């Protein structure tokens, strides 16, 4: 290769490097990224996802948190409070920004290395200057930039999936906290009634109207109600603290937290299975993530193959020799090529790892696609079953129990039944009400899980078996 040819290569390389480097200098725009994420997850964030980086933004978040805490917190309010107040959400956004910035950095050309050498030979002084950079890095820069853009896109999709997961956790924690509070309130009412009946049984035994066994039955009922009240108190505390952690509340903020007394009413109509399945394959983020991983594995295949075999460094040299005896200064220019010889390592392990990663990405994508529809059907089944059960309790079991209770009060007033038959019926009604609260809770948990499964990644939803409604509680009385 002649000197003129090399000079031409250097000039072209310099121009190309400058153009590509300038083109690749764009950094990650986190504001635009969050705007895109808000658009992709609007049903979950309502467009309120924001990373606070300034004092003004932090003050705005603090004001919004105070406004939300000043009123009774609905499910949507809880999500907004978590987005505005939770340090975990801010950590998630900042970490995603860092991941995208690192992915963007991988698509840039490494800075050139400048080395300087000073050597003296008798009356001669030699100054050597070398500017070198990775030739292979330069040649593969377009491909690395394409991979980098894919990684940034992957990080954006992952951010959307993480936000949906975070919001789903908040929604489900809110449902559990409200249901636990509702159950606690009812358990307190039952305990009060049980205490009164136990006292009544005691007095009736004292006057000889009841025997020891009849009194013991009422005392056991009171003891059970007391134990259930204690359990309900702890369950309510656990659920409330879980919600507090997800909202990122301080101790002072936790003291201000006010929840509704009851879970929301059921929707008039449940979602239809056709609507759910039609949206599934278009929106599922876990499918998009698996597909992006497969695409990046394919793009990285050729790049890693070259890097596993050879590594080339090229440098532009300019030396100057000063001769004091002759009073001359002689410049020298040239270039250097450095090639790492594949003698000890032929890169077989790297290529094996690369092939394995590509195969894993392909299998992961296939597994995700195959499992997506099945997981969605399972989520919809849980949703629809929970809806039907909750509706059944609302429309059938609870009204029937109420009608039975009213009828038994009439029968008691007419002296057709005794006081303990009336109390036994009340126990069945208590069981029905608690089972109805649990059915409502199961529905709203399933509703949140289905929404996450339709857009993000599948969320596990284990339904508890419906209670008997107290059908056999009166047995033995």
Image (cartoon, rainbow, N blue to C red):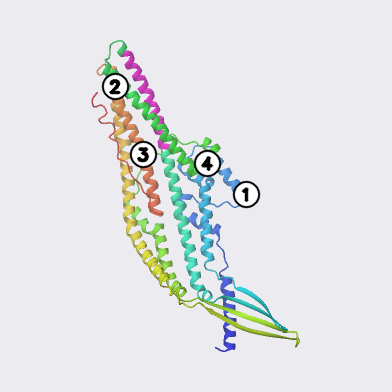
Within the image, what quadrant is residue 364 found in? bottom left
Cα gap from disc 4 to disc 2, whole angstroms: 45 Å
Which of marks 1 and 2 precedes in the sequence?
1
Q: Which residue is mark 2?
A: 217
Q: Which residue is mark 1?
A: 55
Tag nearer the camera, 1 or 4: 4
Number of marks present in the image shown:
4
Which of marks 2 and 3 precedes in the sequence?
2
The answer to which of 229 and 373 lies nearer the viewer is 229
Observer able to see residue 133: yes
Q: Residue 274 appears at what percent x and percent y?
A: 32, 53
Mark 2 touching mark 1, by CB under 8 A? no
Magenta region, mostly helix, strand or loop? helix
Q: Which residue is mark 4?
A: 249
Mark 1 touching mark 4, by CB under 8 A? no
Q: Is residue 91 left or right of residue 217?
A: right
> Dot 3: within a 10 Å radius of its alpha carbon, few (fewer than 14), some, or many (20 or more) residues?
many
- Residues rendered magenta in the picture: 178-204
> Dot 2: within a 10 Å radius of its alpha carbon, few (fewer than 14), some, or many (20 or more) residues?
some
Task: Identify whether 287 is placed above or below 141.
Answer: above
Tag nearer the camera, 2 or 1: 2
Q: Which mark is residue 440?
A: 3
Which of marks 3 and 4 precedes in the sequence?
4
Q: Is residue 188 magenta?
A: yes
Within the image, what quadrant is residue 288 found in? bottom left
């Amino acid at each position: 290769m002649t000197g003129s040819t090399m000079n031409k290569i250097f000039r072209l390389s310099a121009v190309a490097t400058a153009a590509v480097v300038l083109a690749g200098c764009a950094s990650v725009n986190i504001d635009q990224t969050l705007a895109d994420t808000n658009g992709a997850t609007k049903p979950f964030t309502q467009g309120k996802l924001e990373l606070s980086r300034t004092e003004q933004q932090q003050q705005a978040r603090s004001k919004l948190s105070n406004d939300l805490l000043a009123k009774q917190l609905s499910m949507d309010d809880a999500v907004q409070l978590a987005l505005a107040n939770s340090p975990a959400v801010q950590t998630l956004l900042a970490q995603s920004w860092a991941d995208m910035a690192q992915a963007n950095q991988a698509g840039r050309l490494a800075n050139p290395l400048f080395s300087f050498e000073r050597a003296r030979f008798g009356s001669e002084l030699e100054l050597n200057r070398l500017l070198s950079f990775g030739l292979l890095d330069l040649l593969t820069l377009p491909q690395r930039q394409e991979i980098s853009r894919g990684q940034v896109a992957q990080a954006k999709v992952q951010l959307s999936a993480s936000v949906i997961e975070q919001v789903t956790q908040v929604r489900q924690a809110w449902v559990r906290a409200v249901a636990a509070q509702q159950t606690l309130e009812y358990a307190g009412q039952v305990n009060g009634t049980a205490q009164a009946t136990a006292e009544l049984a005691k007095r009736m035994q004292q006057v000889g109207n009841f025997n020891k066994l009849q009194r013991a039955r009422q005392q056991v009922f009171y003891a059970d109600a007391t134990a259930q009240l204690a359990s309900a108190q702890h369950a309510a505390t656990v659920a409330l603290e879980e919600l507090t952690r997800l909202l990122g509340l301080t101790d002072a903020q936790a003291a201000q937290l006010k929840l509704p007394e009851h879970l929301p009413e059921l929707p008039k109509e449940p979602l239809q299975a056709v609507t759910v399945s039609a949206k599934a394959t278009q929106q599922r983020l876990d499918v998009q993530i698996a597909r992006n991983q497969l695409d990046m594995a394919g793009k990285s295949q050729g790049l890693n193959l070259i890097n596993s075999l050879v590594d080339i460094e090229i440098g532009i040299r300019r030396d100057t020799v000063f001769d004091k005896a002759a009073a001359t200064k002689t410049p020298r220019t040239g270039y250097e090529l450095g090639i790492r010889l594949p003698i000890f390592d032929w890169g077989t392990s790297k290529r094996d790892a690369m092939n394995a990663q590509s195969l894993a990405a392909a299998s992961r994508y296939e597994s995700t696609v195959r499992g997506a529809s099945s997981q969605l059907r399972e989520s919809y089944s849980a949703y629809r079953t929970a809806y039907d059960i909750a509706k059944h309790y609302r429309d059938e079991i609870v009204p029937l129990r109420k009608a039975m209770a009213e009828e038994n009060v009439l029968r008691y007033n007419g002296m057709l039944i005794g006081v303990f038959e009336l109390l036994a019926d009340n126990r069945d009604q208590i069981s029905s009400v608690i089972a109805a609260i649990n059915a409502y809770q199961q529905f709203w948990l399933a509703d949140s899980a289905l929404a996450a499964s339709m857009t993000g990644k599948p969320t596990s939803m284990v339904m508890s078996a419906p209670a008997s409604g107290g059908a056999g509680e009166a047995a033995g009385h």
